[in-house]
Image (cartoon, rainbow, N blue to C red):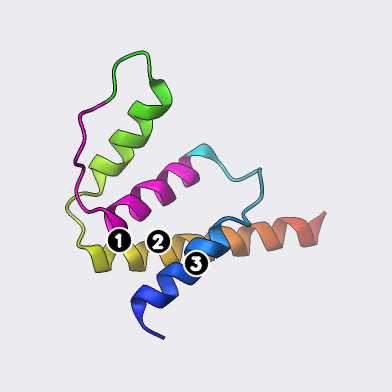
Amino acid sequence: MGLQEEFEEYAEKAKTLPDTTTNESMLCLYSLYKQATVGPVNTARPGMFDLKGKAKWDAWKSVEAKSKEEAMADYITKVKQLLEEAAAASASS
């Protein structure tokens, strides 16, 4: 399986992450996904009243030095980690 196919598979798996996934983790996934699919930030930073938009923009901006391939690989790794944490948490409860 190629990197693109694996990335797409894990993008689907990310949709199954539990609601307990932290905002920080979700921002990390968002930024890596945007970098992998769009590339460097191509929009203006949202205004000061759009706190969620600013957080997402800042997260994306923080990974803009990564190549598309690096972002895909990091995204896959992060989704795997979060899925393992979720499985461990549900197994212990």
Q: Could you say where residue 14 lies in the image, as x and y percent from the top left?
A: 54, 58
Which residue is at 57% across, 64% downward?
A: 13
Q: Residue furthest top?
A: 49
Identify the residue at image location x=32%, y=40%: 59
Task: Give how far across and how far down residue 24 sits, in percent.
Answer: 47, 40
- Residue 57 relative to residue 5: left or right: left
User: For the residues marked 2 and 3, what is the alpha-carbon distance in whole angstroms?
Assistant: 8 Å
Question: Mark 2 falls on what kind of element?
Answer: helix
Q: Quadrant of residue 74?
A: bottom left
The CA span between labels 2 and 1 is 6 Å
Which residue sits at x=59%, y=45%?
A: 21
Question: Are the residues flagged by discs 3 and 1 in contact, CB closer than 8 Å?
Answer: no
Closer to the chain start, of discs 3 and 1, is: 3
Compared with 41, 52 (above or below) is: above
Count the marks.
Answer: 3
Separation of marks 3 and 1 at Cα, in angstroms? 13 Å
Residue tagged 3: 10
Q: Are marks 2 and 3 in contact (CB under 8 Å)?
A: yes
Name the residue carrying label 1.
71
Is disc 1 surrounded by few (<14), some (14 to 19) or many (20+) residues within 10 Å?
A: many
Q: Which residues are magenta?
A: 24-45
Tell me which amino acid carries mark 2. Answer: Tyr
User: Answer yes or no: do the residues labelled 2 and 1 have beta carbons within 8 Å?
Assistant: yes
Query: In the rendering, which numbered label is found on residue 75?
Result: 2
Q: Nearer the viewer, residue 78 or 49?
A: 49
Locate the N terminus by quadrant: bottom left
